[in-house]
Image (cartoon, helix red, strand yellow):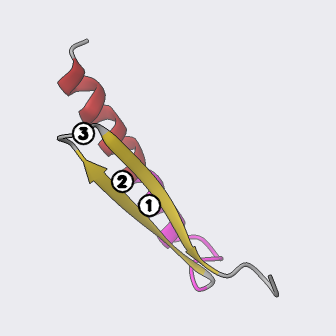
Amino acid sequence: MVVEEYQQYIRHLFSQRQKQASMSQNAEEYEVQTIFDEQQDHYQLLYVGWRGNK
């Protein structure tokens, strides 16, 4: 696999996780965001919000 294929796989994996989280029962408590910096090869899956009383 070349680097571009790995990048595409990571973007797909993170995007799928984001979609799954938006349909979960906890979707009202937090939001899942993806951050892709393809020039520097930085990828983040970020959970934003509160869980319970924390």
**Residue at x 27%, y 33% (from the top left corner):** 7
- Residue 45 in the image: x percent, y percent? 46, 55
Q: What stretch is highlighted in magenta?
A: 16-28
Q: What residue type is labelled 1?
A: Gln
- Residue 33 in the image: x percent, y percent? 41, 66
- Residue 19 in the image: x percent, y percent? 42, 62
Which residue is the site of mark 1? 18
Drawn side of residue 15 relative to residue 4, left or right: right
> Is label 2 or label 3 in front?
3
Q: Is 14 rendered above or below residue 34?
A: above
Residue contact between numbered discs 2 and 1, judged by CB atoms under 8 Å: yes
Label 2 Cα neighbours within 10 Å, binned few <14 / some 14-19 / many ≥20: some
Q: Does the magenta stretch include residue 17?
A: yes
Q: Which amino acid does label 3 sit on?
A: Gln
Secondary-structure class at tag 3: loop
Farthest-out residue, top: 1
**Residue at x 64%, y 76% (from the top left corner):** 25
Which quadrant would residue 13 be assigned to in this image? Answer: top left
| Foreground residue among 19 and 3 | 3
Which residue is the site of mark 2? 15
Q: Which mark is residue 43?
A: none
Q: What is the spatial separation of the Cα atoms under label 2 and label 3, in whole angstroms?
A: 19 Å
Farthest-out residue, front: 40
Q: What is the spatial separation of the Cα atoms under label 2 and label 1, in whole angstroms?
A: 5 Å
Q: Is 6 rendered above or below residue 27?
A: above
**Residue at x 34%, y 43% (from the top left corner):** 42
**Residue at x 82%, y 87% (from the top left corner):** 53
Q: Is residue 21 magenta?
A: yes
Q: Quadrant of the C terminus?
A: bottom right
Which residue is the site of mark 3? 40
Secondary-structure class at tag 1: helix
Farthest-out residue, right: 53
